[in-house]
Image (cartoon, rainbow, N blue to C red):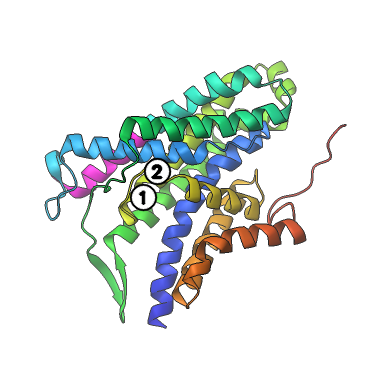
Amino acid sequence: MEAFLQNLITGLSLGSIYALIALGYTLVYGILRLINFAHGDLFMLAAYAALGTATLLGLGTLPATAGLLGHAWAGFAVVLLVSMLAAAAAGWLVERLAYRPLRKAPRLNLLITAVGVSLLLENGAQALFTANPRRFPDLMADTPLLQIGRAQVGSLDLAVLATALVLLLGLELWVHHSRQGRAMRAVSHSHETAALLGIPVDRVIALTFAVGSALAAAAAVLYGVKYPKVDPLMGVLPGLKAFVAAVIGGIGNLRGAVVGGLILGLAETFVSAYGASTWRDALAFGLLIAILLFKPSGLFGHYEPEKV
């Protein structure tokens, strides 16, 4: 039972990270019907932004993790904020330079462009930062906060779960109860109708990319805190798994992306814990095949008729 609880905590923590990345996929798909394959590489760029910020502030040397800010949680918050802003700017730039000029092109052109942007970011990062992996700074010590038998909830798990929960609830409230969120939902329904109603479609789409990229940046910081290694290809596998999570939940559905991320995180953790760790990465793609075979629209998705 204690081992089960420990794996449950670990799985929820990992699943929360996948959920944050998956939300970026589902936001962009919901508004453009585009799979942004560069999303995982924005996750990677955010990790490097967090690494640079932590280095400048003198964070990451345990036990004195606070650096110039006087408290580890303050340092964590600053690194998180800076990386989210940097990723939001990068996401806006990618949309403006790569996707907007092809807005009316065939969908295949956009898909090929997304793959090209992904390769550009990966190879650009290798040229700029080298291919050598770097250690993500220890932004806070992992101290036990709650003990249930031998199962522990440490400060890192709490930071991951609390940050993810705040961001997920904030996104839910923003999308459904703000002016920008209503505009986003209108554009998702119909670009032409939204434009006739006076909604600045291009600005809303750019904002969607920025928000999705900022969520990926938050996931990058949380991922770095839990699994402290940064390299130019670090976004490939988490990005693909988060895409699987979005498909499982029903891509285009925000709550579905969260549920899909949690399902994937828990499944991976329990598979690894109970003797099948070599199947951990294959599990995500096995789940993808299963969901496409038996419920192609995802758990919370639904079919929409298309005009041909």
Q: Quadrant of residue 259?
A: bottom right
Residue 254 image offset from top left, x and y in percent: 59, 46
Can the viewer see residue 62 in this picture? yes
Label 1 secondary element: helix
Q: Residue at x 58, y 26 (%)?
A: 205
Quarter of image, res 132? top left
**Mark sitting on residue 218:** 2
Q: Quadrant location of the C terminus?
A: top right
**In the image, 105: left or right of 273?**
right
Q: Is residue 33 above or below residue 283?
A: above
- How would you rate the neighbour count of disc 2 (Cα within 10 Å): few for under 14, some for 14-19, many for 20 or more? many
Residue in the picture at 38% in, 37% down: 46
> What residue is shown with label 1?
222
Q: Can residue 80 be found in the magenta stretch?
A: yes
Position in image of residue 21 (x %, y %): 49, 46
Q: Magenta part of the protein: which range? A: 70-85
* 174 horizontally vs 246: left or right: left
Residue 74 versus residue 180 in the image, above or below: below
Whether the magenta-drawn stretch holds residue 256 is answered as no
Image point (19%, 49%), residue name: 72
Q: Amino acid at mark 2?
A: Ala
Give how far across and how far down residue 282 sits, in percent.
56, 62
Disc 2 and disc 1: Cα gap in Å?
6 Å
Element on which disc 2 rests: helix
Q: Which mark is residue 298?
A: none
Judged by its main secondary structure, the magenta piece is: helix
